[in-house]
Structure formats: structure tokens, C-alpha cells
Image: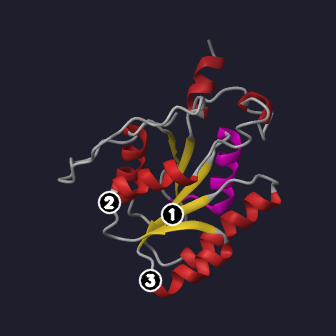
């Protein structure tokens, strides 16, 4: 699991209640797609979700939709959260959804950022499950995830059997896999 880079503390207090026990811990991917270089909000959301009991994989900056989808497949995530502040949301959100569908993986996509009110309907029509705009509290996002996201195939095959990418043998980041392979 990727660690979250140090950040300055925020003044927002977040009341954390434990994740409901459904037998499976939700795995969420927080992605920064495109050339947007501002990631503070994504890191705050990633940390809040992690602190709420979810397993969170953060992609880092400057990811292509293809990179985000590849990571989602490799990490066997239950949902993808995208953060965009650059104004490219009408192109990048639908592209990620398109690539997930093409891969045959029914992973819900939600996200937020600086998204004008008039663009939200277009994004929802494209398949974005929820759009969070500035001013949304981290608790609202956490509660939405708890209410709307379920483990993929929860009642069918175990997670290991559902792996979309059999080439990945470890959940550790690639750098750690290479390091341990040298030993």
C-alpha cells in the first residue's frame, strides 16, 4: 500500500467511526489524472479514507487515465476516486470510466475538485457516481463511500480469485518488489 506523503495538519476535525464489518475491507484508489499539479485535496481525502478504515492506494501526480486504470486493475480496487483541479474533468473522468469498461471491470468512479455546477450532470451521465465540490467535508465523502461502495463480487469469489491482472503477485509497490527480488 502506498504511503501518504507528509502534509501540514488541517483545522478540520474529522470524527472517525469504524468501517462497518462486511467481512472485507474496501480498497480505494485515489488518482490525480492529467497535468494538474495540486494534490493537497487528494492527499487529505486519501488520509481521511485511510483513517476511516479503508485501504487506500494513492497514485501520485500526473497520471494518465491508462495509468490509473492499470493501477486499479493491479491493486484490485473496489472503487476509483479522481481529483481534478485543472478543468479537464469532462475529458478525463469519462476516459477512465471508458477504459475500466473496456477492461471488463465494473469499478465505480467518483471524485471531486474544482468542477462547475453545470458540468456535474454531464459527469453523472458519463457514469461518475458522485461529484464532490469544494466545501464538502471529509466526513461526507467517508459516509458516501460507506453507503454506496461495496467490495466487488462480495458474495461470490474471494478477492484473490477475482484478480484482474494475474501478473501481479504482490500488493507491494513495484520498487519494493524489485528490492525484495534482489535478495
Q: In this image, 82 relative to 37: left or right? A: right
Q: Residue at x 52, y 33 (%)?
A: 1
Give the mark count. 3
Q: Residues within 10 Å of mark 2 (few under 14, many from 20)?
A: some
Q: How crowded is mark 1: few (under 14 residues within 10 Å), some or many (20 or more)?
A: many
Answer whether residue 109 is visible to the viewer in this image: yes
Q: Which residue matches tag 3?
A: 116
Q: Residues within 10 Å of mark 3 (few under 14, many from 20)?
A: few
Q: Where the C terminus falls, by quadrant?
A: top right
Q: Residue at x 63, y 26 (%)?
A: 178
Residue 111: which numbered mark, if any? 1
Q: Which residue sits furthest left?
A: 11
Q: Residue at x 63, y 45 (%)?
A: 78
> Dot 2 lies on which element?
loop
Residue 175: which numbered mark, if any? none
Indicate which label's residue lies in the foreground, 1 or 2: 2
**First reached walking from the N terminus: tag 3 or tag 1:** 1
- Range of the magenta residues? 62-75
Residue 137: which numbered mark, if any? 2
Is 159 in the magenta?
Answer: no
> Dot 1 lies on which element?
strand
Q: In this view, does 127 lie above or below 4?
A: below
Q: In this image, 34 relative to 94: left or right? A: left
Is 63 in the magenta?
Answer: yes
Q: Quadrant of residue 4?
A: top left
Amino acid at each position: 500500500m502506498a504511503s501518504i506523503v507528509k502534509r501540514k495538519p488541517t483545522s478540520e476535525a474529522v470524527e472517525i467511526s469504524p468501517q462497518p464489518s462486511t467481512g472485507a475491507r474496501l480498497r480505494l484508489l485515489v488518482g490525480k489524472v492529467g497535468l494538474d499539479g495540486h494534490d493537497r485535496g487528494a492527499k487529505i481525502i486519501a488520509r481521511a479514507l485511510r483513517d476511516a478504515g479503508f485501504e487506500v492506494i494513492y497514485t501520485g501526480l500526473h497520471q494518465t487515465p491508462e495509468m490509473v486504470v492499470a493501477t486499479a486493475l493491479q491493486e484490485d480496487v473496489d472503487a476509483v476516486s479522481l481529483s481534478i483541479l485543472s478543468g479537464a474533468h469532462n475529458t478525463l473522468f469519462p476516459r477512465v470510466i471508458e477504459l475500466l469498461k473496456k477492461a471488463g471491470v465494473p469499478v465505480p468512479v467518483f471524485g471531486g475538485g474544482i468542477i462547475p455546477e453545470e458540468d456535474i450532470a454531464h459527469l453523472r451521465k458519463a457514469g461518475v457516481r458522485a461529484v464532490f465540490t469544494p466545501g464538502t467535508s471529509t466526513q461526507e465523502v467517508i459516509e458516501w463511500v460507506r453507503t454506496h461502495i461495496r467490495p466487488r463480487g462480495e458474495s461470490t469469489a474471494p478477492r484473490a480469485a477475482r484478480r484482474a491482472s494475474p501478473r501481479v503477485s504482490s500488493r507491494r509497490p513495484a520498487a519494493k518488489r524489485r528490492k525484495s527480488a534482489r535478495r
